[in-house]
Image (spheres, rainbow, N blue to C red):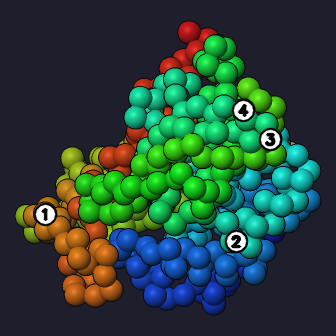
Amino acid sequence: MNLTFSPEEQAFRAEVRRFLADALPSDISERVRLGRHLRADDHLRWQNILSEQGWLASNWPKAHGGPGWGPVQRHIFDEECAAAHAPTVVPFGVNMVAPVIMKFGSIEQQQHYLPRILSNQDWWCQGYSEPGAGSDLAGLNTRAVRDGDHYIVNGQKTWTTLGQHANMLFCLVRTDPNAKKQAGISFLLIDMQTPGITVRPIITLDGAHEVNEIFLDNVCVPVENRVGEEGQGWTCAKFLLTHERTGIAGLGHAKQALRHVKSLASRIQHRGKPLLELPSFRQRVVKAELELMALEVTNLRVIAAARDGGVPGAESSLLKVRGSELRQELSELTRRALGPAALPFFPDFLHGDGGLDDERAQSAAASAQYFNRRKLSIYGGANEIQKSIVAKTILGM
């Protein structure tokens, strides 16, 4: 069963496919296909190509330089990019801080930052989580004290994805320690070249340098870099997180992963028959496919409801929970399909450019992806917290 698309939407899909066939660099798509770690230059090359096409900010309205696509067009674009093994656009600028600046930022902030995001002049990272404030984000302790026309910021952020490449940081800080937790938070835009900022790597289970700790020691930030009013940071944070959680569903990548599982299970033999014919394995594949179809319809409903610049509702928490669980299940099915072939782990291959044939390369990537997918149910708001939001906001419990 597939969703039905109009002739106009089918024509758009064909246009996207032609663009990807012509414009996506083969070396980049090959790294994505084989599960290798992407370099900063890989991301920037592809994002510059998208920017020249006018398709980098697929969720932006035309008024701010985006293509003005509707939810179905954005869905098709994401799906085709995943199928073509295109890198995911680094989301922190285009999909996360940009909507906040559009919604709460001043005209001056919009005129300065939005064009720089579109042209890839700024690489943004996210300063939300802290060692003592992960799921309880409102419990953050990073302080910003007003000193004339500046804030002096002190504190620590952690799990900062790709922060080693970033030149800009959007950051939640506590500006009023005496107010209610949520009311005392502000949202700052911080230049990473400012004295007092230290970035330290955190090496993850798959051997990648993907996340970091960031230390802020008497960092001086102009008051004009605050988005919204002082104390309005929690409102900005919630707005941003619902956009992030909607994207975490990762539908296009889940579809590609499902195709990969089916392909493996059709080729790999178990007692003389394809693994896909084994009832216990086939049942899990079919269940994942049905859940993916349901998730796709829900995702379209959520982004359609927010098409006029609104914020996705608590339904984005549903997308985050089900999307992350489904992608974890697909990585588990891939690992099970490969069996003992998924055991070897080759960090040098994942970081480098060669060294393994195609079959062994995909087996090596399966282990790394299985480890890496464990984080999906934690980052962007732990699934347990998202279930509480759904219970309270949607079910009224």
| Label 2 crowd bin: few (<14), some (14–19), many (20+), radius 10 Å | few
Q: From the viewer's perspective, is 11 left or right of 132?
A: right
**Residue type of the residue flagged with mark 2:** Gln
Mark 2 and mark 3 lie on one chain; the one further toward the N terminus is 2
Q: From the viewer's perspective, is 65 left or right of 371?
A: right
Q: Which structural element holds mark 3?
A: loop
* Disc 3: which residue: 149
Q: Which structural element holds mark 4?
A: strand
Q: From the viewer's perspective, is 38 left or right of 318?
A: left
Residue at 47% x, 49% y is 214
Question: How far apart are the two marked residues, 2 and 4, measured between alpha carbons?
Answer: 29 Å
Residue at 21% x, 47% y is 280
Q: Are marks 2 and 1 in contact (CB under 8 Å)?
A: no
* Disc 1: which residue: 343
* Disc 4: which residue: 146
In the rendering, which numbered label is found on residue 121? 2
Q: Position of residue 73 (x, y in %)?
A: 74, 62
| Label 4 crowd bin: few (<14), some (14–19), many (20+), radius 10 Å | some
Eyeballing the image, is 330 above or below 24?
A: above
Closer to the camera in the image, 102 or 294: 102
Mark 2 and mark 1 lie on one chain; the one further toward the N terminus is 2
Residue 274: which quarter of the image? bottom left
Report the residue that reaches farthest toward the front: 148
Eyeballing the image, is 339 above or below 160?
A: below
**Residue type of the residue flagged with mark 3:** Asp
**Residue type of the residue flagged with mark 1:** Leu
Question: How far apart are the two marked residues, 1 and 4, measured between alpha carbons?
Answer: 54 Å
